[in-house]
């Protein structure tokens, strides 16, 4: 998961005027941190077992308990072609607690859900229900490779093998539309770039955050 600080951050049909504004998102100097003005999304999927092995966060009870989480949603991040908006409304509108509870199947941390709305949802230009509905649709657009759905033993893989598995499982995902994040030994996240209408696309600010030759994917917990 799940640290809001771990990120290297990187709807839908719109009226002509709004689309022109969207198209100008690359001209960030005049639109920086303006809600709804961005170019595409990054869907970040966290490898939950790595988080549970390494995080000192106190907000681990849901994610690191008896349920065998594998990939969970860290966030859906609006992205410019270069750079990204963040915290586009300060203070952010208070997030409806009913939405928080509904998102826990995909994002098993109340603190995370609240943070993602404040830091990224406010930049989407969407209402609270629409933003988290978009998060859910973005997650549904990505197929997790079967070997990573619920491994019962540690997997030792290369970054290239993880990328190739996602490319194979997701028709239309371009090789430059995915990046990984890892520490020295473990996979932490898979990040996939999606258009504003949630189709696979290239990442224009791709910076590979995993340079290890081999990485471990700890097994799911709770079994």
Image (tube, helix red, strand yellow):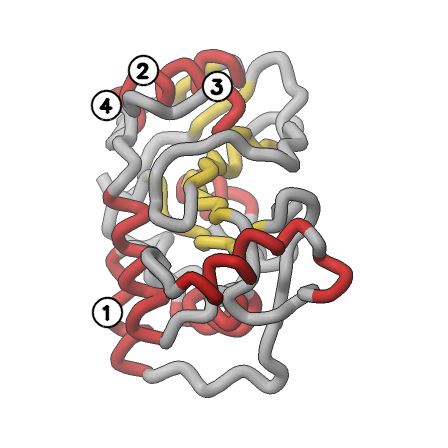
> Which mark is in front, 3 or 1?
3
Relative height, residue 47 to residue 38 (above, below): above
Mark 1 sits on what residue? 102
Give the mark nearer the N terminus: 4 vs 1: 1
In what element is the residue under mark 3?
Answer: helix
Mark 2 sits on what residue? 168
Residue 146 numbered tag: 4
Relative height, residue 95 to residue 221 (above, below): below
Residue 210 in the image, given as x and y percentages of width and height = 63, 26
In what element is the residue under mark 4?
Answer: helix
Give the mark nearer the N terminus: 1 vs 2: 1
Callout 3–callout 2 Cβ contact below 8 Å = no
CA distance separating discs 3 and 2:
10 Å
The C terminus lies in quadrant = top left
Give the mark nearer the N terminus: 3 vs 1: 1
Viewer-nearest residue: 57 or 14: 14
Residue 73 in the image, given as x and y percentages of width and height = 38, 50
Viewer-nearest residue: 143 or 22: 22
Mark 3 sits on what residue? 175
């Amino acid at each position: 998961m799940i640290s809001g600080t771990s990120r290297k951050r990187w709807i839908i049909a719109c009226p002509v005027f709004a689309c022109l504004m969207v198209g100008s998102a690359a001209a960030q100097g005049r639109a920086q941190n303006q809600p709804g003005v961005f170019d595409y999304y990054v869907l970040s999927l966290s490898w939950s077992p790595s988080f549970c092995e390494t995080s000192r966060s106190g907000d681990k009870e849901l994610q690191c308990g008896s349920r065998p989480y594998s990939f969970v949603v860290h966030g859906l991040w609006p992205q410019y072609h270069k750079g990204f908006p963040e915290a586009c409304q300060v203070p952010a509108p208070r997030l409806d607690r009913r939405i928080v509870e509904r998102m826990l199947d995909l994002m098993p941390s109340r603190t995370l859900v609240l943070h993602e709305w404040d830091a990224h949802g406010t930049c989407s230009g969407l209402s609270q229900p629409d933003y988290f509905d978009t998060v859910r649709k973005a997650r549904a657009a990505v197929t997790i490779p079967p070997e990573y759905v619920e491994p019962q033993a540690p997997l030792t893989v290369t970054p290239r093998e993880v990328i190739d598995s996602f490319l194979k499982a997701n028709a239309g995902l371009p090789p430059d539309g995915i990046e990984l994040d890892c520490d020295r030994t473990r996979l932490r996240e898979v990040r996939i770039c999606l258009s504003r209408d949630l189709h696979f696309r290239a990442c224009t600010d791709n910076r590979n955050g995993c340079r290890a030759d081999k990485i471990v994917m700890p097994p799911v917990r709770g079994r």
